[in-house]
């Protein structure tokens, strides 16, 4: 997905970056672009915009990092196996699935053909468990919305 690639490029990390690496790069960039370092109003505003981008990229990449997914794997498995799908939405290769237990997950790089099969499936929950939930990078957006 373009968003993931852009965020990795912004932080100058690759897809194998660990959480510790992300944190180190994030802190270094925030020191460099912190708005309080700049006295000229225009430079300060540019640094503020850049720091917001860096913060957004960092939080996004942390939310999809394999280590984060591993930490929340038990809750994720419980959700996808015990809770039915309440609703789903597809926009630009991102599939957002909401479950009856209140959780919601974004799945990235989902092909349109898979989404169409999900829509036409006799059991969307079973189809999602078999073909989506463990096949595409995801993040818990309900949790992200709560902390934001």
Image: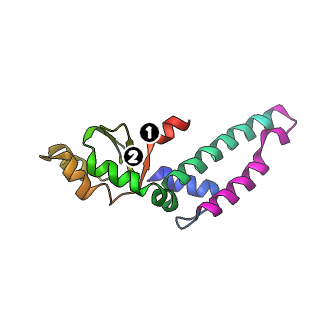
Which residue is farthest top?
A: 41
Residue at image x 50%, y 53%?
4
Residue at image x 40%, y 51%?
75
Between disc 2 and disc 1, whose residue precedes?
Answer: 2
| Dot 2: element | strand
Q: Is residue 112 visible?
A: no
Residue at image x 57%, y 57%?
8
Residue 5 falls inside the magenta stretch: no
Q: Main secondary structure of the magenta part?
A: helix
Coloring basis for residues: rainbow
Tell me the number on the disc at residue 39: none
Of the 4 image quadrants, the one containing the C terminus is top right
Q: Name the residue tied to disc 2.
A: 106
Residue 27 falls inside the magenta stretch: yes
Q: Are marks 2 and 1 in contact (CB under 8 Å)?
A: no
- Marks 2 and 1, how far apart at CA: 9 Å
Q: Nearer the viewer, mark 2 or mark 1?
A: 1
Q: Is residue 49 left or right of residue 70?
A: right
Q: Name the residue tied to disc 1.
A: 142
Rendered image quadrant of residue 130:
bottom left
Q: Which range is magenta? A: 19-41
């Amino acid at each position: 997905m373009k968003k993931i690639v852009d965020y990795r490029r912004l932080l100058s990390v690759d897809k194998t970056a660990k959480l510790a690496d992300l944190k180190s790069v994030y802190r270094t960039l925030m020191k460099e672009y912190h708005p309080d370092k700049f006295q000229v109003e225009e430079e300060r505003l540019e640094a503020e915009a850049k720091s917001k981008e860096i913060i957004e990229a960092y939080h996004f990449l942390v939310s999809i990092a394999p280590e984060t997914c591993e930490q929340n794997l038990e809750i994720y498995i419980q959700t996808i196996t015990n809770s039915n799908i309440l609703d789903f939405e597809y926009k630009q290769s991102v599939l957002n699935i909401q479950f009856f237990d209140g959780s919601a997950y974004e799945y990235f790089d989902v092909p349109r053909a898979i989404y169409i099969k999900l829509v036409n499936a006799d059991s969307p929950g079973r189809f999602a468990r078999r073909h989506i939930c463990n096949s595409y990078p995801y993040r818990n957006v309900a949790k992200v919305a709560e902390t934001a």
